[in-house]
Image (tube, grey):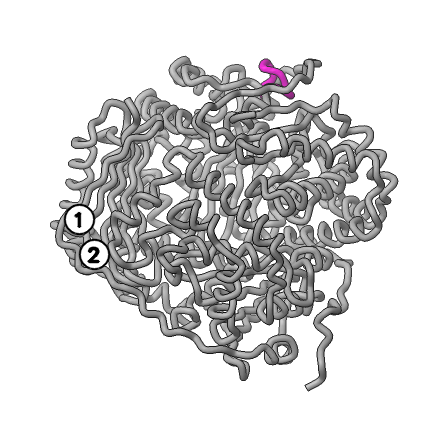
């Protein structure tokens, strides 16, 4: 056998070509837009109903998540039990999710059962009962879960951080208190449902092994309803300028402190967005990032540390997040700021930049794998009126961006005086 | 149905190849037949600590992660009581990088002191983050030693206590590597748009020269048949009272395994399940309640966990659970209910097969238990289960003298 040289890495290629599964846009009889993505070899299908009904649209905390959470708990013709049985009997899954901007219902089913489950899905979407009785059970159990969350340093740090950067009046930053649950009434939910859950404001996204026939089926159930195209109103609140003195919440018995550091940031439509994504990757966006290399792999202060950018509809934010041993909280903060200072003062080497570029392209290739992944990529930009071109532009930026540009972005966006710091635990 | 080919190298490394032409990504999974159950009771948490050290550089390659990231790949690993599993995904064009990296750390680690010191701290922080600094985080640290008397499942993969991790030495690390990290103690699975011949050639090139070794036969102490109820009550600073009931059940290769799994589904899978309807919605005794099986290779646990609603006593809550158990022991589960849980198995299997990494892992784990093709027979095993089976197994295992109960009370 020929000797192999184990010290030398095998030849490799940068990812060059990423194939996107095509999206087909069509309309139901009543004008509702449906986008679908066909692919994969399993006989399965996923349908997302995405409404502009997230926290952004609520006037009172918890209304959006409670309305979303109550959709499956009874409709005009079915009890909560009949709904869950009607879905479970066919091995299907019907999930609800509430986020800052949107609220959604997602159906996962084998193709052969689509016709059997859609009548139930239709009722859940169009005529939920929102009953007092179910609401009381929901409130009780949700507030119990909330009490447990309040015991977690990571949860408290996250919500304190959101209030700190967006202000306590902004829907992204408004803090939730335990008694907010008792102040909520079923009328709040009914009003919210009527304003925000109409098909005219819904994006329907179908993915999996889907063809024209499935869209016709969808049309039978959802295409005959009258719809009102009424975009729910939101107050465009300005984000207040606040001072950036660190916020410290002491937990006497904590073995670890949760740290959040960050600020508001540009969103997907902004010209600096791609560059900032790449910069974030270098700093804390992957396992080989600088924060991970220093604070975990060199110092051993934490099980994990990372940073990220979340682009929401009205504003975005950047955050660094970790839980560190309470005895090393101060040392960890020092190292985090040291890394931020370094990325603002020293150009990234060609070697590190090439690594991050290759890594990002490889990850993008992974995230295009299969129709469900493609559906999330599509959904992530559709909301902003963007399409797959967004990703082609991203690929182009990754390939072309220079260390100099990244340094300029770091200088502009990662100034220490612009960053908010939250520590929950012990200093 | 997952088609695959299988071959064994001269040094005993088993290789499984699954072709999936629909994806540009290759999954590269290697499982070592060593887990927390193989640890000495005075050195628990060692298999997991060792998993961390596998990323600390190997004999010819100083850093594991960087070269993989450089070719667009990513990786991770996990340790369970039964095994240690390492996986990567990367663009198909760069597949050879995975062979290069994985084979070098099987050949030999770098064994640097720095890596041991840092990973020791990282694992201690992991211990704190997931088990000590979380409400209810220590439940399994309490429940395992209550349920198991002799079998090493009586400790969690993270270890019994932090001191075991603090005390690990480089000598221990080297001995562990020599004993367990052998080609004839591992299974490699590669899945993606690949050809069998290509994988054969690459496997031979990178892995075949790694010497095999002697595998010590696994002789784990067995637990005696449990004959009396075990109970433990603790008080913790948590917002809600909780109850945990763990019943001993069969191992993973027993036909009753599938029956036990469906039994737990009838009780608690989804909002149409018995527990949800009766205990949460109708009687309002719990804010959350679940039943699940541990899925372990050796004799496992059928566990019920519940968070009590406010002002509900432990007695009342437990009585209600026992009433549901009595019902499933005395009455046959009707056909519709049985079909429902079987349909969930069918669709969950279909959805799981959309991921090439999932497929690679499932093939590896099945082969570790003796036959990769078991992944293709699972659905059939579930389909065969009858209402009579469910009743029989419920009567076999869901008895209080076979149960360990943990009462997790909030501090007053």
Q: Residue at x 31, y 65 (%)?
A: B220
Decide which of tag 1 and tag 2 comes sooner along the chain. 1
Q: Is residue B317 above or below residue A90?
A: above
Q: Residues within 10 Å of mark 2 (few under 14, many from 20)?
A: many
Q: Residue at x 53, y 15 (%)?
A: A59
* Residues rendered magenta in the picture: A164-171
Q: Is residue A11 above or below residue A376?
A: below
Task: Tell me the quarter of the picture where residue A10 sits.
Answer: bottom right
The chief SS type of the magenta part is loop
Task: Tell me the quarter of the picture where residue B221 sits.
Answer: bottom left
On screen, residue A400 versus residue B75, left or right, reads: right
Residue B19 image offset from top left, x and y in percent? 57, 71
Identify the element where label 1 is drawn.
helix
Q: Nearer the viewer, residue B104 or A133?
A: B104
Report whether residue A6 is seen: yes
On screen, residue A125 versus residue B287, left or right, reads: right
Q: Chain of mark 2?
A: B
Q: Nearer the viewer, residue A114 or B397?
A: B397
Q: Identify the image quadrant of the C terminus of chain B.
A: top left
Q: Chain of mark 1?
A: B
Q: Residue furthest bottom?
A: A1
Residue A287 image offset from top left, x and y in percent? 64, 48
Task: Tell me the quarter of the picture where residue A265 sits.
Answer: top right
Q: CB of mark 1 within 8 Å of CB of mark 2?
A: yes
Do tags 1 and 2 sit on the same chain? yes
**Residue on which disc 1 sits:** B328
**Residue on which disc 2 sits:** B390
Q: Is residue B75 above or below residue A419?
A: below
Residue B30 image offset from top left, x and y in percent? 53, 66
Q: Residue at x 51, y 70 (%)?
A: B178
């Amino acid at each position: 056998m020929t000797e192999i040289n184990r010290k030398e890495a095998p030849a490799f290629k940068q990812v060059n070509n990423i194939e996107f599964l095509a999206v087909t846009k069509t309309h139901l009889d009543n004008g509702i837009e449906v986008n679908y993505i066909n692919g994969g070899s399993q006989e399965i299908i996923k349908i997302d109903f995405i409404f502009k009904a997230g926290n952004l649209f609520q006037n009172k905390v918890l209304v959006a998540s409670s309305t979303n959470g109550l959709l499956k708990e009874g409709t005009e013709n079915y009890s909560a039990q009949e709904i869950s049985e009607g879905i479970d009997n066919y091995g299907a899954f019907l999930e609800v999710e509430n986020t800052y901007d949107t609220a959604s219902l997602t159906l996962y089913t084998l193709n052969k059962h689509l016709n059997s489950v859609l009548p139930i899905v239709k009722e859940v979407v169009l005529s939920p009962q929102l009953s007092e009785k179910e609401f009381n059970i929901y409130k009780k159990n949700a507030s119990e879960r909330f009490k447990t969350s309040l015991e977690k340093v990571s949860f408290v740090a996250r919500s304190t951080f959101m209030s700190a950067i967006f202000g306590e009046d902004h829907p992204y930053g408004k803090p939730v208190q335990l008694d907010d649950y008792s102040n909520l009434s079923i009328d709040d939910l009914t009003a919210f449902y009527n304003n925000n859950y109409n098909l005219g404001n819904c994006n329907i996204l179908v993915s999996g092994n889907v063809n024209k026939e499935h869209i016709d089926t969808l049309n039978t159930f959802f295409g005959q309803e009258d719809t009102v195209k009424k975009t729910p109103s939101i107050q465009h609140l300005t984000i207040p300028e606040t001072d950036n003195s660190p916020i410290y919440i002491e937990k006497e018995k904590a073995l670890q402190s949760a740290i959040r550091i960050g600020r508001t940031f540009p969103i997907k439509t902004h010209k600096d967005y791609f560059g900032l994504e790449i910069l974030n990757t270098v700093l804390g966006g992957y396992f080989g990032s600088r924060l991970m290399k220093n604070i975990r792999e060199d110092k051993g202060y934490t099980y994990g540390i990372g940073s990220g950018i979340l682009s929401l509809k009205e504003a975005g934010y950047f955050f660094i997040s970790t839980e560190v041993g309470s005895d090393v909280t101060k040392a960890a903060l020092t190292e985090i700021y040291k890394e931020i200072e370094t990325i603002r003062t020293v150009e990234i080497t060609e070697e590190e930049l090439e690594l991050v570029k290759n890594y990002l392209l490889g990850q993008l290739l992974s995230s295009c794998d299969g129709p469900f992944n493609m559906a999330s990529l599509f959904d992530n930009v559709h909301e902003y009126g963007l399409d797959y071109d967004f990703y082609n532009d991203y690929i182009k930026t990754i390939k072309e961006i220079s260390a100099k540009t990244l340094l300029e972005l770091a200088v502009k966006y990662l100034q220490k005086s612009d960053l908010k710091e939250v520590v929950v635990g012990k200093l | 149905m997952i088609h695959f080919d299988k071959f064994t190298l001269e040094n005993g490394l088993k290789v499984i190849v699954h072709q999936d032409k629909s994806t540009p990504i290759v999954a590269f999974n290697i499982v070592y037949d060593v887990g927390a159950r193989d640890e000495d009771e005075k050195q628990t948490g060692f298999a997991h600590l060792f998993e961390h050290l596998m990323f600390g550089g190997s004999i010819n390659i100083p850093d594991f992660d960087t070269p993989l990231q450089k070719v667009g790949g990513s990786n991770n690993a996990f340790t369970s009581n039964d095994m240690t599993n390492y996986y990567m995904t990367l663009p198909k064009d760069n597949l050879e990088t995975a062979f290069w990296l994985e084979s070098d750390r099987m050949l030999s680690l770098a064994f640097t002191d720095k890596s041991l010191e840092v990973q020791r701290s990282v694992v201690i922080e992991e211990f704190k983050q997931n088990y000590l600094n979380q409400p209810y985080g220590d439940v399994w640290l309490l429940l395992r030693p209550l349920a198991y008397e002799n079998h090493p499942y009586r400790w969690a993969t993270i270890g019994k206590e932090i001191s075991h991790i603090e005390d690990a030495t480089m000598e221990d690390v080297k001995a562990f590597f020599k004993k367990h990290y052998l080609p004839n103690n591992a299974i490699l699975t590669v899945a993606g748009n690949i050809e069998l011949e290509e994988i054969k050639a690459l496997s031979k090139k990178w892995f075949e020269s790694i010497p095999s070794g002697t595998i010590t036969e696994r002789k784990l102490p067995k637990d005696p048949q449990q004959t009396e109820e075990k109970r433990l009550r603790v008080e913790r600073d948590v917002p809600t009272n909780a109850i945990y009931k763990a019943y001993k059940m069969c191992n993973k290769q027993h036909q009753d395994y599938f029956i036990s799994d469906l039994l737990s589904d009838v009780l608690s899978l989804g909002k149409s399940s018995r527990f949800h309807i009766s205990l949460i919605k109708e009687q309002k005794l719990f804010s959350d309640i679940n039943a699940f099986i541990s899925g372990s290779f050796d004799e496992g646990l059928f566990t019920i966990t519940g968070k009590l609603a406010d002002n509900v006593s432990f007695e009342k809550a437990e009585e209600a659970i026992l009433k549901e158990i009595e019902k499933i022991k005395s009455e046959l589960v009707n056909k519709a209910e049985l079909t429902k849980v079987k349909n969930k198995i069918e669709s969950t299997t279909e959805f799981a097969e959309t991921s090439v990494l999932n497929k690679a892992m499932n093939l590896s784990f099945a082969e570790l238990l003796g036959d990769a093709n078991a992944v293709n027979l699972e659905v059939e095993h579930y389909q065969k289960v009858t209402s009579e089976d469910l009743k029989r197994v419920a009567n076999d295992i869901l008895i209080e003298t076979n149960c360990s109960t943990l009462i997790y009370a909030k501090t007053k």
